[in-house]
Image: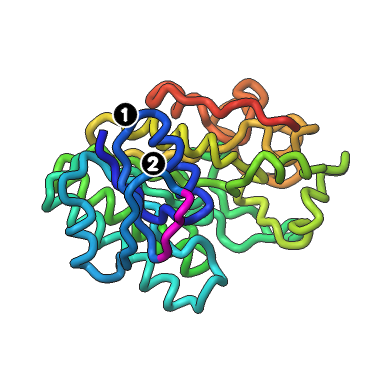
Amino acid sequence: MKILVTGAAGRLGTVVCRHLHEAGHEVLATDRMRDPSLPMPFVVADLAVREAAYALVEGMEAIVQLGNIPNAGRTDAQTTYTLNTAANIHVFHAAAESEVRRIVFASSVQVVSGTRKLGDDAPSVLPHLPFDGELPPCPGNTYALSKQAGETALAYYTRMHGLHSVAFRFPWLVSQEIIDGLRAREDGKSIHSRLAGSANPDEGLSFLRFEDAASLIEAALLRAPCGYRCYMPAHPSGRLHALLPSEIARRHFPGVPHKRDLDAIGSLFHLDEIEANLGWRPAEARL
């Protein structure tokens, strides 16, 4: 498959490019800064310029849209929203006009998570558990707002042009080395020294390895049916791996109703739907 990967020089983008290349796909990488280590053609381009998108999507069969500012705080709030939404609409519109039929978009769990912090007395903004693609938006910053806008735009182009499209609301994406450093105390309050005071429990207290995200993106490119789908992937054990999902829910999501038995599915995230539709499960991480 001929695949354009935007945001190819980012932490997820480099892993995705290598994974798709090693799987035998013909990959074109693009970003605002070149990564000379990537073993495929690389075009330096700014997706905020709409004409750049047309040249990139020409002849492609699929697009992996990762080309966004990757989190809040990287630049001012207005710039984050403006650049991300411009990049997304330019890529989606050019793809639709160029008859590209498969798009995968990297969204974020922050679309649904509000602004709660670990230890706050504030109630969860989540209307239900487990986490799934049906959770309604509740962005807490303009980065999350831009991702919500990207999801809405992708759903629009899918409906208007008959695309096969998937938005993944990714959790914290990490390397195995970071996972090896995760240590949750028995009280479940210290998740990671760097995050203990800032983690938002409404992001699911979870993570996903870059390699698992890359394999999931390939699964979506190969297997997603026609139409728009939104999924929330994560490693099933999460950061509080010593606790049962029901115990995590009691401690951090009191009063939030459960659509499914959390201990029966073994996670705060509804991964069975992703496995049924895309044939994917995350690999076992060393915890």
- What is the span of residues highlighted in magenta in the rendered image? 33-37
> Going by the picture, which residue comes out furthest to the right?
186
- Check whether the beta carbons of the residues at disc 2 and disc 1 lie within 8 A of each other: no
Which of the image's four quarters has the C terminus? top right
Residue at 18 percent across and 56 percent down: it is 94
Question: Is 138 above or below relative to 230?
Answer: below
Amino acid on which disc 2 is placed: Cys
Determine which residue is flagged by label 1: 222
* Residue 277 x %, y %: 38, 25
Amino acid on which disc 1 is placed: Leu
Classify residue 163 as left or right of residue 124: left
Residue at disc 2, secondary structure: strand
* Residue 29 x %, y %: 35, 50
Q: Which mark is residue 50?
A: none
**Pair 2/1: label in front:** 1
In three-dimensional space, the C-alpha distance between marks 2 and 1, rounded to whole angstroms, equals 16 Å
State the scheme by which the image is colored.
rainbow
* Residue 256 x %, y %: 62, 43
- Of residues 209 and 134, the one drawn nearer to the viewer in this rendering: 209
Residue at 41 percent across and 70 percent down: it is 81
Determine which residue is flagged by label 2: 230
Q: Main secondary structure of the magenta part?
A: loop
Residue at 29 percent across and 37 percent down: it is 26
